Image (cartoon, helix red, strand yellow):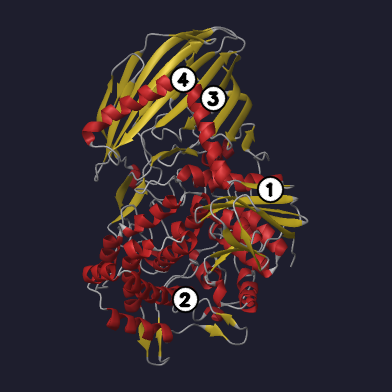
Amino acid sequence: MNQYLKIDQWKIIEEGFNPDNNRASESIFSLGNGKMGQRANFEEEYTGDTLKGNYIGGIYYPDKTKVGWWKNGYPEYYAKVLNAPNWIGIKIEIDGTSLDLAKCEVVEFKRVLNMKEGYLKRKFSAILPGKKNVKVETIRFLSLTHNEIGAIKYEITPLNFSGNFKITMDLDADVYNEDANYDEKFWLEKEKFSNSETRAFNIAKTKKIGFIVGLGMDFRVFRNNEQVKPLSQEITKDKYIAKSFNLKGNKKEKITLYKYSSTASSLNYQENEIKEALDKELNKATSIGFEKLLQEQAEAWKKKWEDSDIIIKGDAAAQQGIRFNIFMLNQTYTGDEKLNIGPKGFTGEKYGGSTYWDTEAYCLPFYLRTSPKNIAKNLLLYRYRHLEKAIENAQRLGFDKGAALYPMVTMNGEESHNEWEITFEEIHRNGAIAYAIFNYIRYTGDERYLHDYGLEVLISISRFWKQRVNFSEPKQQYVMLGVTGPNEYENNVHNNWYTIMIASWTMEYTMYAIDKVKREDPEKYKKITEKLNFNDITETNAWREIVENLYYPYDSKRKIYLQQEGYLDKEQQTVDDLLPSERPINQHWSWDKILRSCFIKQADVLQGLYFFEDRYKEETIKRNYDFYEARTVHESSLSPCVHSILAAKLGYEKKAYSLYLRTARLDLDDYNNEVAEGCHVTSMAGTYMSIVEGFGGMRIYEGKLHFNPFIPDKWDLYSFIVEFRERQIKVEVDKEKTTIYHQSGENLSVFLYGKEHQLNENEKITDKIKHS
C-alpha cells in the first residue's frame, strides 16, 4: 500500500511532489469524457519517469503476437489500445532554461482532481537557475457536453524576477506505447498545417488498419487579464507541429494561456470530413470560451452525480473511495454503441484490448442502476453486433454448426488475447454474456430485447457449450475438460465448477427464451430459426440431456463444491499462513509455485454462488464462503467486491466492510502495487455493487425490488439512488432506520426486510434498521 493522497469527500489531493509517485498519480488523476481520455501528464516538459498517455476510444493497433502464433487457432494479433497523438503540450523556456520539474527545485506542489465538477487542477512553485522563482497554476478538462473538445488554462507568474519567456504550444503525433514490440511506433504522419497565427492541425494515421486521428489546437494569451497577440513562429518536425512565441515576463505579472483542442477520428467521420470537423469544434470552443466551458462541465457533472452519487457520512475515506470509483466509471463510458469499457479505461495501456468479460459481469449492473436504459442496452448490442465474429472465433478452434465463442479480449469482435490458458480455456466469458442478457431484461423489463437480439446470442452460445462437453464413460456423466475458471491461478483444469454451472444455466435459460419467443412472437421466432438454421427439437433435447447429466465436483466431507477436480490434492493453506513479505504472491512467487498452490486469485466458486444465490440455501453459501474466502488472495481487482456482497448476505458485517474498503480504495491506496499501470476501472463497478447489493441488500425477485440493508459500524448514514424500470428510488440507511423514497415514475411494489409495500411517486416508507 502507498497512502500518500489526502482524504477529501469530493477531491483527490496530492500535496508535495515525489517523483516516485508520479506514475501512480498520472493514473489516478486521469480525465475522460467517454470518447477520449488523458493521463495526468504535465503540460510542460518533464524528463523524469512518466507514462505519457492520451487515448481515443476504439483506436487500436493489431500488434503481431509474440507467443503461440504457430499453433492452429491462435489469435493472429494482440490488440493494443494506442497512445494517441498528444494535445496538452505547453513547453515553457525561461531565459533559455526549460521549465522541467525533474530538473528544478520544486518548493510547492499540489494536484487536485475535482470529482464534483470534473476537472484537474495543479499548482506549483519552482526555482530555476539564478534562484528564479516561478509559480504555475493549471486547470484542465475534457468536455462532457462537447466530447471532442479539451481545454487548458495555464497561468505562470515570475515571482522574483523579470525575464524572457519562450512558450511553445504543440500537437505531437510522434508518440509511442510503452509495451510496443521492439519499440515500434504505430503512427504515420498524414498531414499537418496551420490556418492562422494561433491555430494548427496534426492528422495522423495508424499503421496496418489505417485509423485516422486528427488534432486541432487554438490558443489565447493574456497578461494580467488583458489579451496580447504575440507573433508566433511555426515549428514542424516529423508528426509534430507547434506554435512558438516569445513574451516578456514581468515580475509578479501573471501570464495566462488558454489552449483549446479538438479531436476527430475516422471512427466518426469520413476521411474528407476530419479537417472541417476539427475546425468547427475549435470555433465552438473559442467562441464559448474557457470559463463557460468549465461552467457547462460542472453542470453536466452535477446531473451525473444526481443520478449516481452514493453518500456516506461518518467515514471520509469510504466516501472518497466510492466517489472516485463512480467518477471514473462515469467519465469512461457514456453510452456510445461503438465503444466498450477496457479494464484500465482511459488511464493506462495495460490489458490492451477494449473489452473483457468484466463489462458484462461487473460494469453492466452499474449502468443499469444509474443511467437511462439505452446506456446499458448499448453494451449488450456491442456483443450482438459481434456475434458473427464470435462464431468465426469458435470455428477457428474446431467448433461448427453456428457455435459462438466470444473473445476474451477484443476490439472488433475478433479474439486478440495471446495467452493460451486464457484465450482457449477461460471460456466462462461466454456465460457472462448470456447472464448479462438475463440481468438486463429482469432489471429493465425490456422483454423485446430477447426477441430482437438476445435469443440469437443465447442459441449460438448454447451450441458452443453443447460441443465443449463430452461424455465420460467412467463417470457416466458429461464433463468439461481443459478449462481455466475465473481463478487464473489455476490453468488447464478439469471440471471447473463455475464454468460447468454457468454453461448449464445458459442452456436452461436459452430453452426458456426459445419457448417464450415462440409463444409471444411466432413470426420473429421463425425468422431466427431460419437465420440460424436452428432445429429446436433436436438441439434442445441435446441440451436438456447435458444439463441433466453434468458432473459437478463436490466434497461430501466438507459439503462444498470443489473449484475443480483435484483441488483438494493441493496442500491446503489459508491466506493467514502467508508472510506479508510474500504478498502479493504474483509479484514474489514463480508461476510454477502459484499454479501448484491452493491460493485463489479471485472469486471462482463464489462467483457462481453470487450470480445464482437464489438456487442455494444460505448454509450452503456460508460453507463455501468460509472455505474459499480464507484461501483467496484478492490479487484480481474483481475479487473483493463479490466477497463483500456475499459477506453482507451472510451477516459477516465486519468482513463485508473491510473488503468494501479494499475495493473502494484499491487504486487510491495502491493495494496491489500496480496503479502506475492504470486504474482498475471495470472493477470499480463492483465497488458500487458492494454498497447497493451488499450493505443495501438489493435484489430482484420476480420483477420486484427487495432491500435488506444494514449499516457498517463506522458509518452514521449512507444513501444511494437506483433507476429501476423508468422509476428512481432513493434508499437511505442510518443507525436507527431505513427509508425508501420513490422519487419519480409510476407506482411500484418494493420489499423492505421481506415486507411488501406499494409506493406512489413522492411517497416513502420507513422501517427500523435490522442487524445480523
Work out how far the residue at label 2 is from the one at label 3, CA to CA, in angstroms: 53 Å
Tell me the kind of residue under disc 1: Ile
**Residue 481 appears in which quarter of the rendering?**
bottom left
Mark 3 lies on residue: 138
Q: Residue flagged by tag 3: what amino acid is it?
A: Thr
Instruction: Return the mark for residue 501.
Output: 2
Give the camera-side residue of 37 and 567.
37
In 3D space, how far apart are the residues under numbered discs 2 and 4 (Cα atoms)? 57 Å
The residue wearing badge 4 is 258
Please state which of the two labelled residues, at mark 1 or mark 2, is closer to the viewer: 1
Horizontal side of 479 relative to 272 (left or right) equals right
Helix, strand or loop under label 3: strand
Query: Which is more N-terminal, label 2 or label 1?
Result: 1
Q: Could you say where residue 558 lies in the image, as x and y percent from the top left?
A: 62, 83
Secondary structure beneath dot 1 equals: strand
Confirm or deny contact between disc 2 and disc 3 (CB under 8 A).
Answer: no
> Label 4 crowding class (10 Å Cα cut-off): few <14, some 14-19, many 20+?
many
Q: Give how far apart the Cα atoms at labels 1 and 2 are.
A: 36 Å
SS for callout 4: strand
x, y percent for residue 319: 66, 46
**Secondary structure found at label 2:** helix
Q: In terms of sequence position, does the residue under pointer 4 or pointer 3 come before the other?
A: 3
Coordinates of residue 40 in the picture (x, y in percent): 50, 35
Which mark is on residue 237?
A: none
The residue nearer to you, when weighing 44 against 480, is: 480
Residue at 45% from the left image edge and 56% from the top image edge? 359
Q: Is residue 86 left or right of residue 347?
A: left
Name the residue type under label 4. Answer: Tyr
Which residue occupies the foreground of this view, 382 or 555?
Answer: 382
- Mark whose residue sits in front, 4 or 1: 1
